[in-house]
Image (tube, helix red, strand yellow):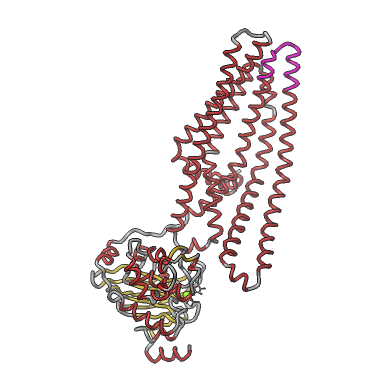
Amino acid sequence: MNKLIQKIKNGTVAEIAKELKWIFQLSKKYTWAIVWYVLLGLLGIGATLCSSVISKNIIDIVTGHQEGLILLAAGTYIAMQLAKIVLNAITGNINTRVQLKVNQQIRADIFGKIMNACWEPVMGFHSGDLLTRSGRDADTVASSILGWVPTFVVNLIQFVGTFLLIMYYDYTLALIALASAPITLFTSAFLTKKMRKHNERMRVIASDMTSFHAEAFNNVQSIKSFGVVDAYSKKLNEIQQQQKDAVLEHNKFSILTSSFLSTVAVIITAITYFFCVFRLWKGHITYGEMTMFLHLSAVLSGAFSALVGLVPTTISAATAAGRVMALTELPAEDCEPLAEVNQTLSSGSCSVHIHAEDMEFSYVSGNTVFKHAEMEAEPGQIVALVGESGGGKTTMLRILLGIVEVKKGKVYVCDTKNNTVMSVSPATRRLFSYVPQGNTLFSGTIAENLRIMKPDATDAELEEVLRTAYALDFINELPQGMYTYLGERGGGLSEGQVQRISIARALLNNAPILLFDEATSALDVKTEKALLRNISEFRGERTCIVTTHRPSVLTACHRVYRISDESIKLLNQKEIQEFIMDS
Ligand SMILES: Nc1ncnc2c1ncn2[C@@H]1O[C@H](COP(=O)(O)OP(=O)(O)OP(=O)(O)O)[C@@H](O)[C@H]1O
Ligand SMILES: [Mg+2]
């Protein structure tokens, strides 16, 4: 018994329960909309049941089994039908509004969570998977909020109300109409696990499909130039084949079960029909009652099917919720603002030193990059980090930016003007301007790309940073200057031009420390040296750390650290010369 309870706790049921609880928490914010939705649903049920009784009365009046005003009954019947149309329209409107609101809120929530989450766990997801989870899965969860609870309440009440009404007129008939319930329930219990598996499988395939497309469309040039278009088409075929297999397999299963349930429904309807005819023939019921019974038994089985239909909807919503939860539960960065950071920025201090002492760092995957490493950088200095590829240069910049955290030792920044010392963390990130390795421009104009850093920057300010980054000349030659539109990742410019705009963007941030990760690798040696000189003198003395593989840069640097074998070594002049000769 204990084993069974444990299995339930750890297994599918516990998972579904956790996911449904999450949806329930989310839907709490929309209690009023749900209440309105349910109330309107109940009015709809009232109208349906009243219509049924009125239609019975009309038939009984015209066949002489009952006395009454035929016109009044007919008028009420029409009014009920019109009321149902109006209720449907209002319900549809509420449904759309709430679904849209929930959907947008979940998407905004996921977006915020991903953006503010610790970097390493987010890196564990493929961008295509993130797109599917924050798109398709969020949609499923949103529609379940107005799908599940109201559908359950409204159909349950419709089911009970209809059943009681039938029972009021004919006890036996009510039991016949209900005969399919145990069979349907038994079948749906059997379906649950299978559906969950299918849902999970389909959602993984959807993620694979989006990831595949995102990656392929991002790399059209490489795919073409590697001559691997056919290989990629084949890969798409493989994913499509998986999708086809999964859909067809589930379809076969669905057809079998729904055919079985439909057969049961047909048998029950036939029995109800013949039983009604028999009772009519015997004179136990009137024509009107027969019409009403037939209508009500259809309503009853409709409500029951809707209740049973909630099983797959619930499973699908729970599966989607589980996938969305994986994102919303990502550990968040500690971004609590630091007064010292504000003080440094508002005082315009450029006297910020960097110290790393006895630092140890490894990635979550276990890859150790630094052990007992030391480093220092002072204002007005350009400090170079060199070393072989994969040594840890970019990682060092990630540590300084507080994107990853050291396991041991101290890494801190020291503002000598304001006499403050701050350990690096997400909160100290604002002290740094960073030019990452690779192309990081966004689609939009050059000016828009720059103003990401400072939305209220004037054109003159933009020109100043572009001039410092040696970008103004080529931009002035473009037909629309700095208002020229760039495609994704700076499409339309050369790599070196993109690098210079990225540097200008970092300068606009006006932070006391500059971090350049191979930011000048695509420039010619002359421009590179002149640019570095410009930057170290730009608006006062900044602390500047550059990573590079190019010996030409080193002559423009004040200090050179070599990263190798998990340590950081300060090179003397002789060693720098040797390094330049070896490179
Ligand atoms: N997200 C990550 N998760 C796990 N290991 C990583 C991650 N990023 C980098 N690494 C590993 O950390 C080590 C240092 O990588 P890093 O990118 O810092 O090297 P680098 O010196 O900048 O190299 P390059 O000159 O090629 O840019 C490498 O062994 C790399 O494989
Ligand atoms: Mg690197």
The quadrant of the rendering that contains the N terminus is top right
Residue, far front: 479
Q: Residue at x 28, y 72 (%)?
A: 350
Q: Residue at x 71, y 31 (%)?
A: 265
> Is 312 one of the magenta-colored residues?
no
Q: Main secondary structure of the magenta part?
A: helix
Range of magenta residues: 273-292
Q: Horizontal placement of 516 versus 122: left or right?
A: left
Query: As rendered, which of 387 and 44 lies closer to the eye?
Result: 44
Q: Residue at x 66, y 29 (%)?
A: 301
- Evaluate whether residue 396 shows in this view: no
> Is 283 one of the magenta-colored residues?
yes
Residue 523: x %, y % from top left: 45, 80
Residue 412: x %, y % from top left: 33, 71
**Total numbered badges shown on the rendered structure:** 0
Residue 424: x %, y % from top left: 35, 68
Q: Horizontal placement of 388 versus 293: left or right?
A: left
Query: As rendered, which of 560 and 512 lies closer to the eye?
Result: 512
Q: Is residue 62 above or below residue 535?
A: above
Q: Horizontal placement of 537 versus 502: left or right?
A: left
Query: As rendered, which of 411 and 455 lies closer to the eye?
Result: 455
Q: Where on the picture, by quarter, is residue 573?
A: bottom left
Query: As rendered, which of 354 and 36 lies closer to the eye?
Result: 36
Q: Where on the picture, by quarter, is residue 289?
A: top right
Q: Is residue 563 above or below residue 11?
A: below
